[in-house]
Image (spheres, coloured by chain):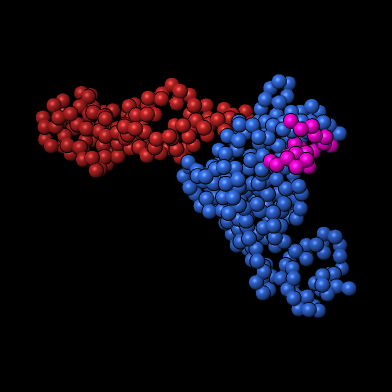
Chain colours: A blue, B red
Amino acid sequence: MVTLTIDGREVRAEEGVTVLEAARENNICIPSLCYHEEVAPYGACRLCLVEIAKNGRQRLVTSCLYQVEEGLIVKTNSERIIDNRRMIMELLLARCPNNKVIQDLAKQLGVEKTSFKLEDNQCILCALCVRVCQEVAGVSAISLVNRGVDRQMATPFYEHSEACIGCGSCAYVCPTDAIKFEDVDDTRIITMPNSKLEFKLKKCKTCGKYWAPEKQLDYIIKKVNLASDAFDNCPDCRD
Amino acid sequence: MGEILTDITEGKGKDGDMELLERLSATLIDGSLCALGTAAPNPVLTTIRYFRDEYEAHIKDKRCPAGVCKELITYLIDEEKCPGCGLCVKACSVEAITFMGKKKPVVLDQEKCIKCGSCYDVCELDAVIRK
């Protein structure tokens, strides 16, 4: 256990956890978009910037990446942080002016309007979907492509990804709802900013309900060595 | 940042652009993970510091004092100096300059001119003016 100070409050945290996790554990709010406890931190949205003082030197770090240290003094709401956070929010707002999540967060941080040219995106390139696809689903069907201002989240060559199993984890974690999925009859449609993927759903042998993508079930059967008829019935009809 | 700077060079700069660049630079310096990020806005910051008058000329007067920004400059023929030698006529890649006969000044068609500066470079008598 280490002891650190966050906003003047003494906080005890386990070694190895990040400043963001320690703060949230103690009900100290730090805004963030690209953090998710299930995947490795990435530091993409940069909203979770905090000011740390170490050896008499102050600097800004992303709290989702910075690990707690003994005697660390953290400020989450100094003027310098608020200024920077607002600027970052302005940039995000310029990128996704029509996104509800971004609009609400901007309002929360006191950003009314942005000084930058408006674009029309939904995706903030936080790579949460990419990380989940790689670390949780384990298929790496999507990635961030291109560099700099051309960076995009996409399937390989913008085509129907062979690796994708249609699990929808990417849509589930997307902080801005840029990826959506819906099940229409026997098809699951995943809509991404640059592509649209369709998957055939499996029909339950007992009740006839379409309940999960065939590809995903095959993947699970293969991965954990289940019997090939393990998923013939939906969870409700299983005994 | 690149977009704002490009707008300024194209005469589309607005009041407050310089302040916005400075604010954006400050955030970039504070929020960057690596030292390359903290150094990235330095060219912008130093040009604003040492060439503030040039920025102001571009934004407020829509003028490029150094004669570099294509959108903000025009080439003119000084009719008194031009002897009608035709060097510029040959140099012009878009045939914007018409030869009017010997000892008569050439005529430059502003609509055709792509502001490449070839005529300016080739004229030995400084009869091409860059504004």
The vertical placement of B32 against A210, above or below, is above
Q: Compare residues A95 and A160 and report the one nearer the observer.
A: A95
The vertical placement of B45 against A180, above or below, is above
Residue furthest toward the front?
A: A8
Query: Can residue A7 be seen from the camera position used here?
Result: yes
Q: Quadrant of residue B130?
A: top left
Q: Residue at x 57, y 56 (%)?
A: A194
Q: Is residue A159 left or right of residue A6?
A: left
Within the magenta stretch, is there residue B118? no
Within the magenta stretch, is there residue A24? yes
How many marks overall? 0
Residue B105 location in percent, x, y?
14, 32
Quarter of the image with the C terminus of chain A is bottom right
Residue A35 location in percent, x, y?
70, 45
Q: Residue at x 26, y 40 (%)?
A: B113
Residue A57 location in percent, x, y?
68, 22
Q: The magenta stretch spans which residues?
A: A8-30
Query: Can residue B68 be seen from the camera position used here?
Result: no
Q: Residue at x 52, y 26 (%)?
A: B42
The vertical placement of A142 against A204, above or below, is above
Q: Compare residues B75 and B56 and report the one nearer the observer.
A: B56
Q: Quadrant of residue B15?
A: top left
Quarter of the image with the N terminus of chain A is top right
Q: Compare residues B65 and A103 and report the one nearer the observer.
A: A103
Q: Is residue B41 left or right of residue B79?
A: right
Residue A172 location in percent, x, y?
69, 57
Q: Is residue A218 left or right of residue A188?
A: right
Q: Residue at x 20, y 37 (%)?
A: B108
Q: Compare residues B118 and A155 and report the one nearer the observer.
A: A155
Residue furthest toward the right?
A: A239
